[in-house]
């Protein structure tokens, strides 16, 4: 486990970029954290690390998944509305797991029981001041070291 403090959206993006640069494809990055904590901001940084155009990154709240092509593709899910196993299946989540890209999920709280064992878990919590966020990464040491 590694913990870092971010004091701005830019810093959050930057921590995410450092992780993104280490990804090779097939990883699952699961984001946990309340409304407006910076999950989509984090995905923007991940995309940057994967050399994907970050202007394309927005919350896939209604479409549930955004697919971004790149040398390593990024599949960006928003699980906010996922309540049942049937809902989850209909997003294509399990099909995307078989593909070569990086799969990233917002609102992972809603699908925690189906996350693969080697999932990289990122939790974003509020800090003391308005723009402060505590980012925690739990996963293989190789990924945790992105921030050390
Ligand atoms: N240190 C920080 N890191 C990330 N975002 C921050 C930080 N400080 C302030 N913010 C603000 O918090 C908001 C985060 O928005 P973002 O859409 O990334 O959150 P989210 O967790 O994806 O929200 P949602 O639950 O609606 O999907 C932005 O308005 C951003 O400017
Ligand atoms: Mg979001």
Image (tube, rainbow, N blue to C red):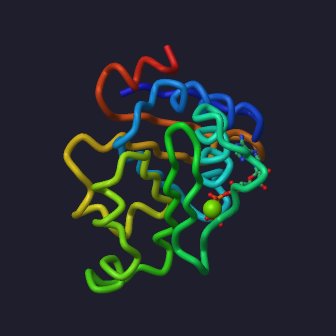
Residue 2 position, x and y percent, is 42, 25
Which residue lies most toward the top here? 148
Q: Tell me: 127 left or right of 91.
A: right
Q: Position of residue 58 (x, y in %)?
A: 70, 61
For the N terminus, the image quarter is: top left
Q: Residue at x 34, y 43 (%)?
A: 26
Q: Nearer the viewer, residue 72 or 6?
A: 72
User: Residue placed at 58% from the left, 39% from the top?
Assistant: 46
Q: Is residue 62 above or below residue 109?
A: below
Please give the name of the residue rendered at 48% of the width and 28% of the height, measured from the top-left corner.
3
Q: Quadrant of residue 132?
A: top right
Q: Quadrant of residue 121?
A: top left
Residue in front for this viewpoint, 72 or 87: 72
Task: Pinpoint residue 61: horizontal percent, then vertical percent.
Answer: 60, 74
Seen from the viewer's position, the closer of residues 51 and 113 is: 51
What residue is drawn where x is 75% and y is 41%? 9
Q: Total label count?
A: 0
Left or right, 33 with respect to 54, comes to left
Residue 39 at what x, y percent from top left?
Answer: 60, 53
Question: Is residue 26 rendered to the left or right of residue 19?
Answer: left
Q: Taking 142 as reference, is 16 left or right?
A: right
| Figure check: 121 above or below 138 | below
Seen in the picture, residue 125 relative to 36 is either above or below; the reply is above
Residue closer to the observer: 41 or 135: 41
């Amino acid at each position: 486990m590694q913990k870092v403090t971010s004091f701005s959206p830019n810093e959050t993006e930057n921590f995410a970029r450092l992780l993104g640069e280490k990804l090779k494809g097939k990883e699952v990055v699961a984001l946990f954290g309340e409304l407006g904590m910076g999950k989509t901001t984090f995905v923007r940084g991940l995309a940057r690390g994967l050399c994907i155009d970050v202007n394309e990154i927005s919350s896939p709240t209604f479409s549930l998944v955004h697919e971004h092509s790149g040398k390593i593709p990024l599949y960006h899910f928003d699980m906010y509305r996922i309540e049942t196993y049937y809902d989850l299946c209909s997003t294509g989540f399990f099909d995307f797991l078989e593909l070569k890209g990086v799969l990233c999920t917002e609102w992972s709280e809603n699908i925690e029981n189906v996350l693969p064992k080697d999932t990289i878990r990122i939790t974003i919590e509020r800090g003391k001041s308005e723009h402060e966020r505590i980012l925690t990464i739990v996963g293989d040491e190789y990924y945790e070291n992105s921030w050390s």
